[in-house]
Image (cartoon, grey):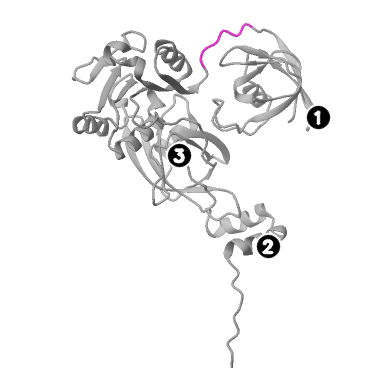
Amino acid sequence: MKSQLRPVVRPGRLRRLVSPFVAPDVFDFWAGRLNRSWTWERPRARLLSRETAARDAVTLVLKPNRHWQGYKAGQHITLGVDIDGVRYQRSYSLVEGPRADRRLIITVKAVDGGKVSRYLLEQARAGEVFELSQAYGELSGAPAQAASLLLAAGSGITPLIALLREQAAEGFQAPMDLIYWVREREQACFLDELRALAARQPQFRLHLALTGDAATAADEISGRIGSFDLGERVADLEQRHVIACGPGGFVESARALTGHAASFQAEAFSPAPVAVTDEGEVDVILQRSGRSLRVARGTSLLVALEAAGLKPKHGCRMGICNTCSCGKSAGSTRHLPSGELAHEPTQALKLCIHSAATDLELDL
């Protein structure tokens, strides 16, 4: 008797076949009763472990579910964190390059008044599950065999440590200097690792810039960016590929001080301070909801909408992740990081870094 071969239906194909008959939210609700990491299509991550990274910082190890698509060194993720029944979204940099075990490592520094950073620092425990975005961000390392200069302020070290670790794994094919600004020595993340790396790798030099503590070690300097000549620390600055990360004001200072470098790329974790002189209020019409409200000029649209009791989608609040992007069909806006006005009648904008300059109509 001939054996009969049964067709094999692979899981991916089975999922495509049944997709028209599945409501993802319903599936997630019931699957979540068994395991909160189980979803139909949404990426989530489970907290595996935590370790103190500095006096006011913690490193978290996360395990994403199968819907997460991977990342490159220097990119970010957005975590959705539930606190007292309210979901908050915050952006964090991955501090390592891609791993064989697919685990994600982030380091979170406490923010003054920061509800989410304090929760992750003090209360989040192993087993907790977070919503997770796909990775985003365009920060990348210097070209192969090109000398580089990394400039980091505060939590700006987090994407740069991933790029540095990736370079270290390849054996430092070119010189790399890191100048890392913190107020106090105990606030510096990865300091033991950085010093050990500098001790064994002659191509890598660490400069710990202290703005509060006095410099006492050979690799320490005192003062804010601009208070000393970068060229004295890095003699071949014009040949360096500069990568800067930190608050907006810091990034703009770095840009000005390294204008003659070979190249410059940066990410700002907050908008640079810009004197926005707009005064008064304007009307904003939300086309999809039909709602109209008055908002103040000079205030980010995200903050203004939240003050009115609305909850627009958002992520990083810094203009990086695009979660709060929406369409504008009428009116003028001001780009807060640069102060520039945009008058085009049909334009996409990011609520977190744009304010209303005139009456607006938004696709919300």
Name the foreground residue: 32 vs 139: 139
Q: Residues within 10 Å of mark 2 (few under 14, many from 20)?
A: few
Q: Amino acid at mark 1?
A: Gly
- Residue 106 left/right relative to 82: left
- The reply to whether the magenta stretch includes residue 132 is no
In this view, the residue farthest toward the right is 290
Nearest to the observer: residue 209 or residue 139: 139
Label 1 Cα crowd, 10 Å radius (few <14 / some 14-19 / many 20+) = few
Q: Is residue 115 above or below residue 64?
A: above
Residue assigned mark 3: 72
In the image, residue 26 sits, relative to residue 263, either above or below, namely below
Dot in front, 1 or 2: 2
Main SS of the magenta segment? loop
Which residue corresponds to the image point at 60% horizontal and 31% vertical from the top-left? 322
Residue type beneath disc 2: Val
Residue 293: quadrant of the picture: top right
Q: Measure how far apart labels 2 and 3 are at the Cα level.
A: 32 Å
Nearer the observer, disc 2 or disc 3?
3
Q: Which residue is mark 2?
A: 18
Q: Secondary structure at mark 2?
A: helix
Q: Secondary structure at mark 3?
A: loop
- In the rendered structure, which segment of residues is drawn in magenta? 272-277
Cβ–Cβ under 8 Å for marks 2 and 3: no
Disc 3 vs disc 1: which is toward the camera?
A: 3
Residue name at image x 24 percent, y 14 percent: 214
Determine the image quadrant of residue 169.
top left
For marks 3 and 1, the one nearer the N-term is: 3
Residue under the image location 65 percent in, 8 percent down: 278
How far apart marks 3 and 1 lie (CA) works out to: 41 Å
* Disc marking residue 290: 1
Q: Is residue 47 above or below residue 111?
A: below
SS class, disc 1: loop
